[in-house]
Amino acid sequence: MKNLLDTTPIADWTGRKTKPVVISGPCSAESESQVLSTAKAIADIDSSIVFRAGIWKPRTRPNAFEGIGTEGLQWLQSVKKETGMKVTTEVANAKHVEDCLKHGVDILWIGARTTVSPFAVQEIADALQGVDIPVMIKNPVNPDLQLWIGAIERIYQAGIKKIAAIHRGFHSFEQTPFRNIPSWEIAVELKLTFPSLSIICDPSHICGNTELIPYISQKAMDMEMDGLMVETHITPSIAKSDAKQQLTPAELQQMLLRLVIREHVSLNKEFIDQLAQLRSNINKADDEILQLLMKRMKIAREIGKYKRDNNVTILQATRWEEIMKDRVANGKMMGLSEEMVRKLYHLIHEESIRIQTEIMNK
Ligand code: PEP
Ligand code: MN
């Protein structure tokens, strides 16, 4: 189904004229006054911001605040009436979709815990059949691009063209500064699969705290993402969910003012010439890398033959440890990161073993 999605850009259905599209509001709708005061403060920044608030909250453990439920949809109607902002909330089943449609919710989103379940996404898609409402689809909790693509395809096949993807980071067992580790590679891979699909970033659920939000938001802009979904609360410290990661509306305004939006293409001739020259240098360097890899694999093949003819095993752990240590140290001296050199040599080693095994078995 590659490249076949003809989705409508997010700027068209949010009505936001300048980049980035911004979606903001509390993690959860908690009370009518919390919703309305947050919404009014956001609308004062710019009423073309789309207002978000979770009505049904997927909480990891039971007995936490699981959202106000359908009653909160009336508060979203008041937000629309009083501020003119468009409103969006998370849906996880057919009943949620129905309730949102009845209450005039403008845009729906599917959360990370729902995207992981093809049954749940299909149920939502079936409820959306024949309905013209935009849907944003968060990445699944685990870094599985196919699962994300599958959810997007299910909604598209229900006849929805106003679709955007939301990169909100992925669960990881690694200790990192993030609540959900960002994977820009997966987001780029998604864009390459569906070039017309708008992709926005949710720095709040990536960071899990407020300090890193400006950094991740800028990174998303530098990666040419179309927008940001940022959690804001009128009094974050007393929020009933995700208290640590919500900005105040004033902090949101500051963050947006500081964002640098770079042009996709510069029309300056000197810039274009210089970039073309640099790109041609990169192409040459890549060519050299591939030729060297070819040469290295040819040597691996010869070693394989030699080992086979002398009845020696393929894997010689001490030799491999020696190579890794030496290459990492050399790389460091050349200013290359240890992580990159390790990953690269891991791949090279894997391929050498594969080649040698092939030869052994001949
Ligand atoms: C949310 O946006 O509040 C939310 C529950 O997000 P996610 O699905 O990304 O965890
Ligand atoms: Mn949240």
Image (tube, rainbow, N blue to C red):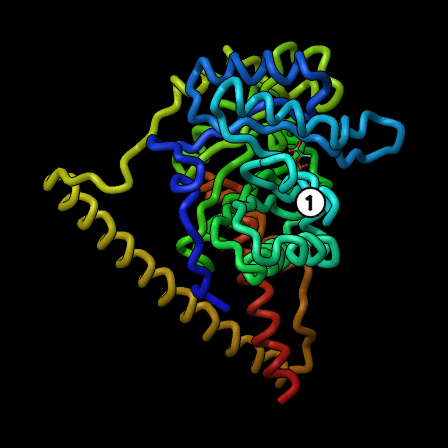
- 135 and 126: which is toward the camera: 126
Residue shown at 63%/78% (left/top)? 357
Q: Position of residue 246 (x, y in %)?
A: 62, 19
Residue shown at 59%/11% (left/top)? 37
Looking at the image, is 293 positioned above or below residue 124?
A: below
Residue shown at 77%/26% (left/top)? 68
Q: Position of residue 350 (x, y in %)?
A: 60, 65
Given the current orientation, which residue lies at the most extreme left position? 269
Label 1 residue near ligand 1, CB within 8 Å: no
- Is 120 left or right of 26, judged from the image as shown? right
**Label 1 secondary element:** helix
Quadrant location, ligand no. 1 = top right
> Visible in this render: residue 341?
no
- 301 and 26: which is toward the camera: 26
Q: Amino acid at mark 1?
A: Glu
Q: Position of residue 213 (x, y in %)?
A: 54, 24
Q: Quadrant of residue 176?
A: top right
Q: How many marks?
A: 1
Looking at the image, is 137 positioned above or below residue 318?
A: above
Q: Quadrant of residue 224?
A: top left
Residue shown at 59%/41% (left/top)? 108
- 173 and 192: which is toward the camera: 192
Quadrant into which the C terminus falls: bottom right
Q: Position of residue 251 (x, y in %)?
A: 51, 13
Q: Which residue is mark 1?
A: 98
> Visible in this render: residue 314?
yes
Looking at the image, is 312 positioned above or below residue 207?
A: below
Looking at the image, is 131 positioned above or below residue 353?
A: above
- Is 331 left or right of 353, judged from the image as shown? left
- Is 215 left or right of 112, judged from the image as shown? left
Given the current orientation, which residue lies at the most extreme right position? 63
